[in-house]
Amino acid sequence: MPAAALSPEVLAKYEPVIGLEVHVQLLTASKAFCGCPNRFGAEPNTNICPVCLGLPGALPVLNEKAVEFATLASLAINCQVRERSIFARKNYFYPDLPKGYQISQFDKPLAEHGWIEVPTADGGTRRIGITRLHMEEDAGKSIHDGLADSANHTSLDLNRCGTPLAEIVSDPEMHTPDEAFEYLTRLKEILLYCGVSDCNMEEGSLRCDANVSVRPKGQEKLGTKAEVKNVNSFRFVRAALEYEIERQIEVIEAGGRVIQESRLWNASEGRTYSMRSKEQAHDYRYFPEPDLPPLIVAPAFLEARRAELPELPEARRARMIAEYEINRQDSFTLSASREFADRFETAAKSARNPRRVANLLLNEVGGRLKALELEQENSPVSMAGIVLAADLLDEGKISSKQLKQLFDVCFEKNEDFPAVYEREKPQQITDASAIEKLIDEVIAANPKQVEQYRAGKKTMAGFFVGQVMKASKGQANPALLNELVTRRLEG
Ligand SMILES: [Zn+2]
């Protein structure tokens, strides 16, 4: 179906409505209801036991750490946590679900009524509602290719059975693929900051299903939705939504009806395919899990989780903007991960001037990394190196020109700043009379600027400092130079 055939005028008649379901594996040591290791990449079918395989007579026991993580995540996305939630059996058959049902939560989930802030194109933010967060277990994995006998067989790896999941369901209130992309990015960031999941999409620890429908603008009633299943990158979610929105509009424009169904995204073809008609909730015959008591989240447990909440990314960015006098774009760079933000802030606090550390990291180091297309983790200059550079600048022991030259050497030779500084310790002119001689030359050569300074334009001092620094080939001691220039001009 050539989606490009639709004109902007036709597209503009419709409003897309998007809701997202995110499954996130919780980073517990053991599984949700048994003691098997919860670990990716083990030999197939080695981390399994009667409980996670659902063998007759086996009984599940809830992993408290999983409840801690799910509760922490619920608070981080501003949900109300239910004191008493109920596990339910979701019955369906699938080869990688040996129990024939999944332990999930249904009408009494762990948490509801949350929201997160998502940046908008105009530089503001918009609040996206979160319907619920509930706990459930993962299924195993069917392996259709990559093995010697894959041409004839599908293999099963049941290690993943019983891995604890939080499913986070947004309200259906996003209207563009870009907004969905932002929501996912921010949600993932929050979960990473909380440390409840590694959110590794390649390993499947964060997975996303997108529900999308279109309706004529102004119509209250939602259109029929399609669900795009298991898209494995946020970029693909955006592309799949773009495709799906146009496909649905095309169907309606041609006089047809959108069918409620699950669709699969094919990344190499850039389109979705019908997979199966979508189950309704009643198809699963949910009923309360008879082997597990209601989950009670006592007030003390909840408060303990609240106390564990880290400073979340959006709040951290707001504080960083104020504290380090940086712009919003730079605050995203510095808060890219909690680990990086922590390292930066620990370093900044140890320096004489934390703002200078931010500035050097973003501009001097960041600029060189960008020019070389390197990531932060490949930077030759460590945080400690940046702190040393900032302090040397601050104490006037090197000029900013010398600093730039030293950083250039760091990047050329892939060496950290302290080593380069020790070796190349730039010459510095600290002899006042030598500097004064240069100042006199510059003053003599620039009578007009001297006049302006003496007429009250004090900022002219910077001009003289710059000129003398240049004449000294960047070697004049900056603090001394500043002092001498002012004294000479005033004198
Ligand atoms: Zn097990």
Image (tube, grey):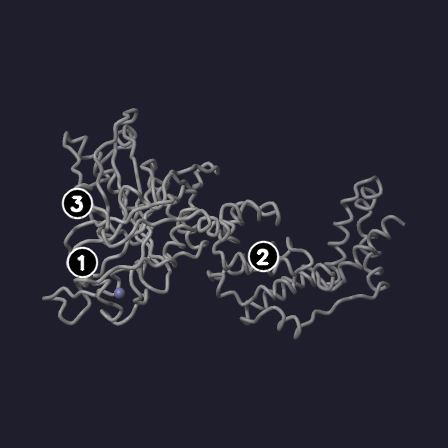
Q: Is residue 276 above or below residue 30?
A: above
Measured from the top left, where is residue 52 in percent x and y? 24, 62
The kind of residue tagged 3 is: Arg
Q: Give residue 386's quadrant in the image.
A: bottom right
Compared to 91, does 408 lie above or below?
Answer: below
Which numbered marker is on residue 99? 1
Residue type, numbered disc 1 = Lys
Look at mark 2 in the image and give the residue it sits on: 345
Q: CA distance from mark 3 to mark 2?
A: 51 Å
Q: Which mark is first along the chain, 1 or 2?
A: 1
Separation of marks 3 and 1 at Cα, in angstroms: 15 Å
Q: Residue at x 22, y 61 (%)?
A: 141
Q: Quadrant of ligand 1?
A: bottom left
Instruction: Work out whether mark 3 precedes mark 1 in sequence or the reverse, and give the earlier one.
Output: 1
- Measuring 46% from the left and 36% from the top, which residue is drawn there? 122
Residue at the extreme left: 152
At mark 1, the secondary structure is loop
Disc 3, ligand 1: is the CB inside 8 Å?
Answer: no
**Residue 486 image position (x, y, % from top left):** 83, 51
Q: Residue furthest top?
A: 218
Q: Which residue is mark 3?
A: 285
Distance between mark 2 and mark 1 Cα atoms:
48 Å
Which residue is more in the foreground, 34 or 114? 34
Q: Nearer the viewer, mark 2 or mark 1?
A: 1
Give the residue at the far bottom of this rendering.
423
Looking at the picture, tell me which residue is in the foreground, 253 or 357: 357
Residue at figure coordinates x 46%, y 54% from the top left:
193
